[in-house]
Structure formats: C-alpha cells, structure tokens
Amino acid sequence: MSDPNGPGTVNMVEIRVILDRIDPPMGRLQVTPSAGPARDEEPEIPFTGWLGLLRALYLVTGSGPENR
C-alpha cells in the first residue's frame, strides 16, 4: 500500500544523552545534525526520571506535540 502523502523525509542526526545523575536518571539530550564534535549552539532538552527521558526522546525525534 502506498503512502498518500508521498515518501517521508529522512534526516540523519545524532542524539547524545548526557547524564548528570544515574538513579533516578537526570540529564539532558543534545541533538546534533551529524556525528562529530558537538557545537555549543545545539539546544539541550533536560529530563528527569525514566518517563522524562522518554518524553525528551519523543520530542527530539519529531513525534512530540511541538513538532506537529
């Protein structure tokens, strides 16, 4: 079955998980356009706890309400 909206766009990014604390997990996600050294201007998404990490991943992968 074909997609009525046409083919999707695939962007290659690297999602870095920076942990400040392990139990419960607390830290931030940084999305870079490609592999390699991170630049300081890349936005960081903070998270606390396992659900916070899942929510942050949901947002940075383009599935969150901010990206619809």
Image (spheres, rainbow, N blue to C red):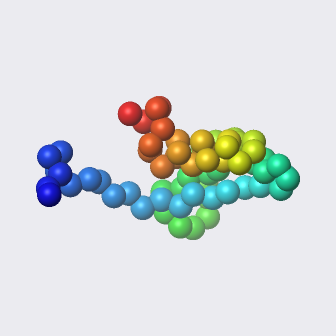
Q: Is 58 displayed left or right of 27 in the figure?
A: left
Q: Is 10 displayed left or right of 49 in the figure?
A: left
Report the residue at 42% width, 36% height from top.
67
Report the residue at 57% width, 67% height from top.
36
Q: Nearer the viewer, residue 5 or 45?
A: 5
Most distant residue in the bottom direction:
36
Q: Is residue 47 above or below residue 2?
A: above
Report the residue at 75% width, 45% height from top.
49
Q: Is the C terminus in the top left, top right, bottom left or bottom right quadrant?
A: top left
Q: Position of residue 40 (x, y in %)?
A: 65, 49
Q: Is residue 48 above or below residue 15?
A: above
In this view of the protein, can residue 41 be seen by the observer? no
Most distant residue in the front direction:
1
Q: Nearer the viewer, residue 61 or 49?
A: 49
Q: Is 20 displayed left or right of 68 in the figure?
A: right
Q: Nearer the viewer, residue 15 or 22?
A: 22
In this view of the protein, can residue 10 be seen by the observer? yes
